[in-house]
Image (tube, rainbow, N blue to C red):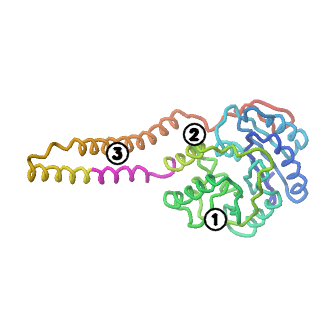
Amino acid sequence: MQTPNSVSIVIPVYNAADTIGALVDQLVAVLGPRHALEIVLVNDCSPGDASEQECCKAYQRHARIVKFYSLAKNVGEHNAVMAGLRHTTGAYVVIMDDDFQNPITEVEKLIAAGAASDVDVVYTFYAEKRHAWWRNLGSRFNGAVATIMLGKPAGLYLSSFKLLNRFLVDEIVKYDFPFPYLDGLILRATSKITAVQVEHAARAHGRSGYTLRKLVRLWLNMFTNFSILPLRVATGLGFVITLLGIGLALYTLYERLTSPTLPPGWALMTIVICVFSGAQLVCIGTVGEYVGRLFMGMNKQPQYTIRRAYDGEAAHAGQ
């Protein structure tokens, strides 16, 4: 039963065998006595380590608090979080990483901020981020684009460590298309947003599972799932290049009339062909990305598939 101080913590797990057990134990020890606590672990089909086994052990140690869902295929952090959100029951839901970069003591700050104000989501920001430089650069790029495309409040950092209330969680999980972008869903559903400053610790073990390829896929989810701005940019680009082509045609005609002895402009023609071909491919590719995602959504491609669920007395097959 949901109580006013009930808190669910969703942790997407990926190659975190060295940290996830200790993280769960500390969450139970620190937050368990103060809140009606629920911890939802979602193993995103971690390859080559013992994350699955460590999550099972954590469930066995704290079966009354921990739920564990093992995905059949790696689907990415946002899809894994969606799987976790659908199995939460708390009045507040905290989403945090599996690597101790979000200190457990900072969870209380989010809970206090959510309880003290009439907001639906509490984001976090850091005085110093302990990510690689290219991750920080990507975050700034992502934030700038989200401000333009999603109406993100200027200055808001879209952190993965955040708190959502039950109203917002219930709205988010209605989204069943295969390419969720969590922050896009949040910004689409509410404008009641605040942020608190928290510490950002160094990773306890290993390295981030995010690669440049995964970040690009995440950006594409934002671009094509929650805004038609790329289509408008492609349309504008088409108009600009059309005008450029007309200008070049008039220039070529003028050059030919004023200097009939000049050889035909093969170099200019090659440039024009390359520019127009590139613009056409960009526009077609943009439209194709939208159509392809619509096609996969219509085909009911799942956000995730749960292979095993540990949320009761025994494990059972997921949906």
Residue beneath the point at 64% across and 38% down: 75
Sequence order check, earlier mark of 2 and 3: 2
As for residue 232 lying within the magenta part, the answer is yes
Neighbours of disc 3 within 10 Å: few (<14), some (14-19), many (20+): some
Tag 2 secondary structure? loop
- Marks 2/1 in contact by CB < 8 Å: the verdict is no
Q: Which image quadrant for residue 33?
A: bottom right
Q: Amino acid at mark 2?
A: Pro
Place of residue 19 in the rendered image (x, y in percent of width and height, measured from the top left)? 82, 45
Q: Main secondary structure of the magenta part?
A: helix
Q: Quadrant of residue 276?
A: top left
Q: Is residue 257 magenta?
A: no
Give me the disc on residue 279.
3
Residue type at numbered disc 3: Ala
| Residue in the image at 18% along x and 49% along y | 249
The residue at which mark 2 appears reads as 178
Question: For the magenta stretch, what is the residue range?
Answer: 225-241
Q: Residue at x 29, y 52 (%)?
A: 239
Callout 1: SS: strand
Residue type, mark 1 in image: Ile
* Mark 1 to mark 3 CA distance (whole Å): 39 Å
* Residue hosting label 1: 193
Mark 2 surroundings within 10 Å by alpha-carbon count, few (fewer than 14), some (14 through 19), many (20 or more)? many
Residue depicted at 40% across the width and 49% down the height = 231
Which circle's residue, 2 or 1, is located before the other in the chain? 2
The tag earlier along the polypeptide, 1 or 3, is 1
Please tell me which residue lies in front, 140 or 157. 140
Measured from the top left, where is residue 291 in percent x and y?
44, 39
Q: CA distance from mark 2 to mark 3?
A: 29 Å
